[in-house]
Amino acid sequence: MAGKDSSHAPQQKEIQLSFGPRISDFGFPPARLEPCHRGANPYPRRVGIVNVALGERSYDIQIGTGLLHRLGPECARLGLGTRCAIISDTNVAPRFATAARKTLAKAGFAPALITIPAGETAKNLKTVEACYNQLAAQRFERQSFIVALGGGVVGDLAGFVAATYLRGLPFVQVPTTLLAQVDSSVGGKVGINLKAGKNLVGAFYQPRLVLCDLRTLVSLPTREYRAGLAEVIKYGIIYDARLFQRLERDLPKLLRGNPRILAAVVARCCRIKAEVVRQDETEGGLRAILNFGHTIGHALEAISHYGKYLHGEAIAIGQVAAARLSREILGLPAPDVARIAAIFRRAGLPTRLALNAPQRQKLLTAMQLDKKVRAGEIKFVLATRIGTVKFGQRVPLTAIQHILNPPPSEVRSTCRHSAKEDRLRRMGPPSTLSH
Ligand code: NAD
């Protein structure tokens, strides 16, 4: 099944991170920090644990460095089954599958590896079917489990395979992109795309464990790392004004991959997502806030055939558009709109689109296919101020059209950033870090 990666330029610089010995929190109420294995502690380092409290479907998100090597013992501790299949992609498997297989084999499992093509274009039914066929050919039975080793594409797809093969096998998420660590691996939304739209087929199916090994981010291309920052910034806008302020202050360090700040930010984002999912597992209401910027973002991904924009880039554009709509509909203060646009720009993410009339029409049509559309009405998550949003907001078509085609006077940049940040944005992180 291996194929070529079509989602990003492979020659990009890789982000350089080097990790200190422990997570330290970043001024937030601390994540439960504890040696993760009780009894004889095999960990030289501490691990942040965020629990997703969902009754019998509860699970832990472990955040730390070197956790990949704990995959086998953790799966054994949870008693997940006797055999397992690792689903990974063509970029991630060569880097991390050997370590994953080793720890799983040592813990007594007989791990098989299924490698899917890298990139969003592989997140489809054809790839799912190929995974089913491999599982069947290798006679995977109900006492088996699945490990999703990769970014959000692998996590969503492998989770969907786990939810549906033999009517459900347990699964573990080992996210290897920033986006997957702070967002997609948590909360149990699994699924695939159709040509007609993103994530149109899927399920709510919770993993049994999420292992965020920050060290896997070392090989992540800069562009992907920045795309992950789009989801990080989202948490500040929708839930946590203090996080937003800290991101404004510490963005240069985060762009350089400062391990202390990165660990704290990942833990904070996971805690916010866990809390939202705890309150509303299946998106009856509150969980919709996580879709801030996604109505336009998903439509943009669909009309560009999942090839031009990374998910994080599309939702960066979508969030800035949602902030502008929030100004029109809910009176989000203009300085807040400017701060939102500025932080995405400073993170090196796109913030607007230059669309001609037919393209705008295509985007509007695609938005109407979004899952959030009820009775033909597009509903948005809009902000009243940074840190507070309202979901289910009706937005007139004319307002969306205005946002997609603003007069030139509104297009002027309000962003101010230092020459140093400018350089960082253009060049990506330096190859050696000081922290
Ligand atoms: P991705 O999975 O495509 O990964 C990005 C790229 O980086 C891929 O080419 C991948 O092979 C490569 N990669 C991954 N880890 C790497 C590593 N450590 N080193 C080097 N290369 C690595 O994309 P993503 O941004 O992680 O996830 C995007 C997907 O997540 C979208 O499909 C989106 O819909 C989904 N998503 C789901 C949820 C959810 O709640 N389920 C939430 C947000 C996003």
Image (tube, helix red, strand yellow):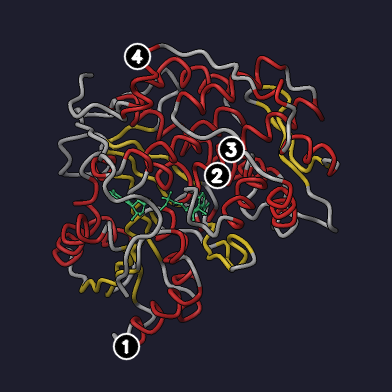
| Count of numbered badges drawn on the protein | 4
**Which label belongs to residue 137?**
1
Residue 24 vertical position relative to residue 308 in the rendered view, above or below = above
**Which label belongs to residue 40?**
none
Residue to which mark 2 is pinned: 314
Residue to which mark 4 is pinned: 420
Q: Amino acid at mark 1?
A: Ala
Q: Amino acid at mark 3?
A: Ile
Left or right: 279, with 285 as reference point: left
Q: Residues within 10 Å of mark 1 (few under 14, many from 20)?
A: few
Residue 355 vertical position relative to residue 256 in the rendered view, above or below = below
Asked if the residue at tag 3 contacts the one at tag 2, i.e. Cβ–Cβ closer than 8 Å, the answer is yes
Q: Residues within 10 Å of mark 3 (few under 14, many from 20)?
A: many
Mark 2 or mark 4, which is nearer the start of the sequence? 2
Q: Residues within 10 Å of mark 2 (few under 14, many from 20)?
A: many
Residue 64 vertical position relative to residue 141 in the rendered view, above or below = above
> Quick one: SS at disc 3?
helix
**Of marks 1 and 3, the one in the foreground:** 3
Q: Quadrant of the C terminus?
A: top left
Residue 221, quarter of picture: top left
Residue 154: image location, x then y, percent: 40, 61
Residue 412: image location, x then y, percent: 63, 20
User: Is 330 or 224 nearer to us in this picture?
Assistant: 224
